[in-house]
Amino acid sequence: MLAILGAAVVAAVIAVELRPREPFGFGRHDEEEWVRIFHEDFDAGELDRSVWNTCHWWDDGGCTISSNEELEWYLPEQVAVSDGRLLLTAARERVRTPDERTFEFRSGMVTTGPPAHDSTARFDFTYGRVEARVKVPAGTGLWSAFWMLPSNEDSRPEIDILESLGDQTSTWKFHFHPEDRERRSDGHDVEGPDLSEDFHDIGIDWEPERIRWFIDGEQVWEVEGDHVPDEPMYLVLNLAVGGVYPGPPAEDTEFPATYEIDRVTVWQRST
């Protein structure tokens, strides 16, 4: 997500028949081998502020990612929890920032990273299985994402567990941006179920020198090599509007638009 500008991305598109498959996936772990170290099902009725921030660590009364030329300003009021789901909502409402910039859209995001510069991540980990159950909004210019960043505040390495463009909601997009900017980033697309019509499980299995991506328990891609991260990383979920990747919203893009997250879980091996 952060590294989309200037990245040399190699993308492939494959069509797969998705079926739940052991051992990856919610509720399908051997408890003797795997330990659940993080689980958020949003059943408490409100956002757990001890775990989640509503902006990146450069929060200044809100935030955005200017390097992507995104059109939204993230605000905490665009984040809600209702009926056991996290709701990140984008609206076509103008907002003026503390440094006197104007954004035509406001939206929501959450992260378990550092709440401010030179602070400690709320939750981070090195290696494990990560999964979220999500449903994305449809509409040109919408950009839903579930990703990971290093806890030291660097923008790389970056693991994009899922990126979904609102005008291509049947195309599941995955990217990996290594720490070495001279090394090519990797990208992969999968044609699958429409993410805007129902909830689906998306996740990765991150281990030394290998990351594997899964949809509904089915492995669909992997990256291998010594460029795979070996450092603590944290989680990010956000709904961006516009930018160089999705382009601007169309006149018929419907707002408000909401990215729904049913749960987020992380497991690690017990030994």
Image (cartoon, helix red, strand yellow):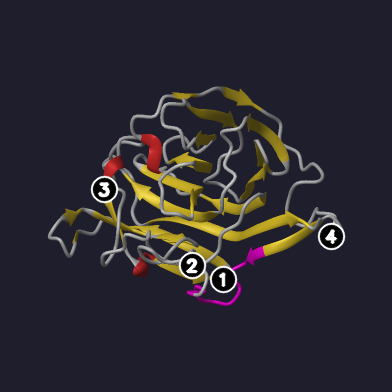
Q: CA distance from mark 3 to mark 4?
A: 44 Å
Q: Secondary structure at mark 2?
A: loop
Sequence-first disc among 3 and 2: 2
Under mark 2, the amino acid is Trp
The residue pinned by badge 2 equals 52
Say if mark 1 contacts mark 2, CB within 8 Å.
no
Question: How many neighbours does mark 3 have within 10 angstroms: few (below 14), some (14-19), or many (20 or more)?
Answer: many
Q: Is residue 24 left or right of residue 72?
A: right
Q: On the picture, is 241 further left or further right than 48?
A: left
Residue bearing mark 4: 31
Residue 257 colored in magenta in the image: no
Total labels: the figure holds: 4
Residue that badge 1 annotates: 83
Question: Could you tell me which secondary element the residue under label 3 belongs to?
Answer: loop
Q: What residue is shown with label 3?
A: 71
The image quadrant where one finds the N terminus is top left
Residue situated in front as seen by the camera: 254 or 242 = 242
Main SS class of the magenta portion in the image: loop
Q: How dense is the environment of label 2, judged by Cα within 10 Å: few (below 14), some, or many (20 and up)?
A: many
Residue 249 in view: no
Choose the circle earlier in sequence order: 1 or 4.
Answer: 4
Q: Answer left or right for 193 relative to 177.
A: right
First in sequence, mark 3 or 4: give its number: 4
Q: CA distance from mark 2 to mark 4?
A: 26 Å
Q: Characterize the local packing of mark 4: few (<14), some (14-19) or many (20 or more) Cα atoms within 10 angstroms.
A: few
Horizontal and vertical percent for residue 98? 17, 65
- Identified by mark 4, the residue type is Glu
Residue 178 vs residue 220, the one in the foreground = 178
